[in-house]
Amino acid sequence: MSDTFLDLIFFAMVAAFLVLRLRSVLGRRTGNEPRPPRDPFASRRPADNGTVVQLPERGKPALDAPEPSVPGAPATPRDPIEAGLAQIQLADPSFGRDDFVTGARRAFEMVVHAFATGDTGTLRGLLSDEVDGNFTHALQRRVKAGETLETTIIGIKSADVVDARMEGRNAIVTIKFVSEQVNVTRDAGGKVVEGDPNQVTTVTDIWTFARNTRERDPNWVLVETRSEN
């Protein structure tokens, strides 16, 4: 009986000694040990237990997802007009579509009024040399015939950009104006030879403006006119 008791004590002491040796060699886990490096080629997908939502793989766009944008980079326009306007803005950072259209509306009214009254000084500052020459020729012909033109713009119904592009250093923008006007041409005696002073006509004009973006002069000039009427 005593021998058996002594044997139990001996084995207990041996077991305790082995436990202490293992702890000294392997250490004790505290929960703060650094994680082992992750195998970059191992699958990282968790087991699907019915609650996992699979997300697109990082670095690869999801199907039908928009391309990621670069901070500070302008969005790539898909419409040709928007693409042209974007090119103009790159060449001239001060260019803005809304401001340009507002200025073009004012220029439209100024040119129409100056042409009707024969104000060549105003026209010269708004037209290219070629267009100014055409307008001057028409004014001279009208004066020679002894005729006068009366034009009243009732209002501009719309002014839409229909084309925009860069040609070398030149920015070119075309606008379609739809306006309501009263146009009357009278002869030397004041008799109406064309138009009706009591009739408002809807007139559609397509005007093209241009500007050399390398020059300091910020003004645009009218380089082409045509009408759909």
Image (tube, rainbow, N blue to C red):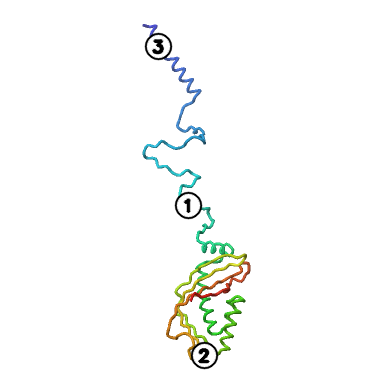
Element marked by disc 2: loop
Q: Which residue is at the front of the view, 52 or 139?
A: 139
| Discs 3/1, front | 1
- Mark 3–mark 2 distance (CA, rounded to whole Å): 137 Å
- How far is disc 3 from disc 1 in space, using C-alphas? 75 Å
**First reached walking from the N terminus: tag 3 or tag 1:** 3
Q: Nearer the viewer, residue 25 or 71?
A: 71
Residue 113 screen position, x and y as percent: 52, 81
- Dot 1 amino acid type: Pro
> Of discs 3 and 2, which sits in the foreground?
2
Q: Which residue is mark 1?
A: 66
Q: Residue at x 36, y 39 (%)?
A: 50
Q: Residues within 10 Å of mark 1 (few under 14, many from 20)?
A: few
| Amino acid type, mark 3 | Leu
Cα–Cα gap, marks 1 and 2: 64 Å
Q: Quadrant of residue 200?
A: bottom left
Which mark sits nearer the N-terminus, 3 or 2? Answer: 3
Q: Position of residue 212 (x, y in %)?
A: 61, 69
Does dot 3 land on a helix, a strand or a loop?
A: helix
Q: Which residue is mark 3?
A: 8
Residue, x 53% and y 92% (percent of image)? Answer: 188
Residue carrying label 2: 187
**For the residues bearing labels 1 and 2, Cβ distance under 8 angstroms:** no
Horizontal arrangement in the rendering, residue 15 relative to residue 119 (left or right): left
Q: Residues within 10 Å of mark 2 (few under 14, many from 20)?
A: some
Q: Position of residue 61 (x, y in %)?
A: 48, 47
